[in-house]
Image (cartoon, rainbow, N blue to C red):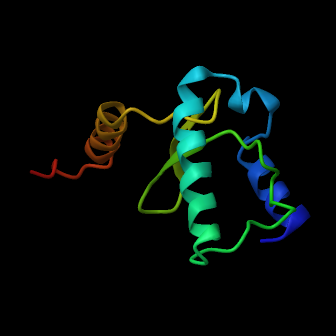
Amino acid sequence: MRGGKASGRYAEFGVESASRALLSPRAWGPVSGAVFRGGWDVVRGRERLPAADQPGGRLGLPAGFLIGADGRVLAAEYGEQAYDQWPVDELLHLASSHRHAAGRPPER
């Protein structure tokens, strides 16, 4: 996806870009580690520099979606800063409850 198309698709699902993405100290370690590792790979010739124009911008906030077998969005989680992640226990509980609601037995 390029430029407007990507931005439009992100916006369609309520995913946004904001300068607050990098304001949380919880994000600083993972972001600086990724920048260091990526920079080291560029210096060693294993990677190229990222494109100057990133689809959706460089300050995108994370979002996660639980998608049903029929393709519908069953649940969504929108991050407030760059390192927000959907808690795995919550995601598994949501997936299990939607599975029960669909009349399927729980997986073991």
Q: In the rendered image, which quarter is residue 53 located in?
A: bottom right
Considering only vertical position in the picture, is 54 above or below 95? below
Residue 51 horizontal/vertical position (percent): 80, 67
In this rendering, would 7 be left or right of 29? Answer: right
State the residue at coordinates (32%, 42%).
Answer: 101
In this rendering, would 96 be left or right of 9? Answer: left
State the residue at coordinates (38%, 32%).
Answer: 87
Tally of marks: 0
The quarter of the rendered structure image containing the N terminus is: bottom right
Depth check: give the residue in front, 4 or 104: 4
Give the farthest residue toward the left: 108
Give the farthest residue toward the front: 44
Residue 81 horizontal/vertical position (percent): 64, 29
Residue 48 horizontal/vertical position (percent): 69, 74
State the residue at coordinates (81%, 31%).
Answer: 19
Give the farthest residue toward the bottom: 45
Considering only vertical position in the picture, is 25 above or below 50? above
State the residue at coordinates (48%, 36%).
Answer: 85
In this rendering, would 32 be left or right of 87? Answer: right
Residue 86 horizontal/vertical position (percent): 45, 35
Depth check: give the residue in front, 60 or 23: 23
